[in-house]
Image (cartoon, helix red, strand yellow):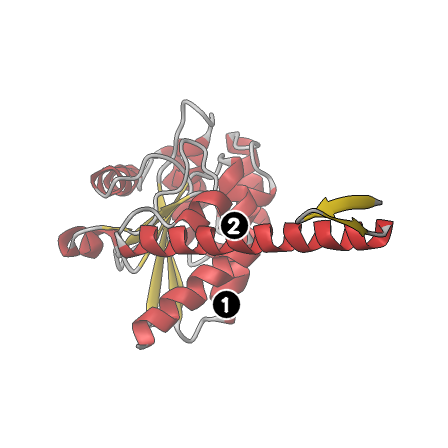
Amino acid sequence: MHTRIFGREVHISFWKTIGILLFISFIGGATLFGYRVYGYFRAIQQGDANPYLSEKLQSSVSHAVANTNVTSEDLALIQDTSSPALGSDTPTLTIVEFLDYGCPFCRASFEPVRELTQKYGDKVRLIVRNFPLEDLHPGANRAAYAALCAQDQNKFWVYHDKLFVNQGTFEETNLLQYAKEAGLDVGVFQSCLDTQKFRNRIESDVTVALRAGVQGTPTFFFNGARIQGALDQKTLEYLIQAFLKQELK
């Protein structure tokens, strides 16, 4: 190929042309990447929602809300000591999850949440609280009652897992079958379920959640920073490591 540069005719081969175009594309890409990183830095520095998380996280109601910290009073209410918990008794990072057993986004998160909480169990504590959306997920209230009835017999986590594995099948016969499989006293469990023994606890969870700005499920609080949306393993590990480093500074 021939072209004119500063009035002189120059011969440029096909492969040289391709090389120049690739070089220009690389420079353009690097510039765009740098601009994007700078934008992320400025957004985080100014306290806006973390744009990395906004891209990565999805929710049943809205996009993720990150870098939104609750008050110390609300944090004390959120980190309720009577709620089901897993992990360290003296954690560096406390993760509180408000969930709905009928929510597919909660179902997508539950395995990586459990796996990574156990991986970082010497530094992290996971607390589970309820935010059932019965209108969206029929049977969610009944499933929440059942999970707390299982906790009453020290079988919360195995029952919690069964509810997600069998998501959507929350008729009483199903819940009783899960109780039997989990090794619960089925008679005591059924009485707990029939009397809605933990109705006030669940209503309290919902009240606390709404006060703290929960809009959908799942919503997580990482040491009080609210992050709403399903978490895959990569994103969750990124968050855990980021919060642990921040606390250890």
Q: Is residue 90 visible?
A: no
> Disc 1 or 2, which lies upstream in sequence?
2
> Is 212 positioned to the left or the right of 115 in the image?
left
Is residue 30 in view from this perspective? yes
- Viewer-side label of 1, 2: 2
Which kind of residue does numbered mark 1 sit on? Answer: Gln
Which label number is shown at residue 160?
none
Crowding around mark 2 (Cα neighbors within 10 Å: few <14, some 14 to 19, many 20+) is few
Viewer-proximal residue among 110 and 160: 110
Residue at screen point 52% across, 53% down:
31
Circle 1 crowding by C-alpha within 10 Å: few under 14, some 14–19, many from 20 = some
The vertical placement of 116 against 92, above or below, is above
Callout 2: SS: helix
Mark 1, residue position = 118
Marker disc for residue 32: 2
Please tell me which residue is depicted at 56% across the width and 32% down the height of the picture.
168
Image quadrant assignment for residue 62 = top left
Gap between marks 1 and 2 measured at Cα: 38 Å
Q: Amino acid at mark 2?
A: Leu
Image quadrant in which the N terminus is located? top right
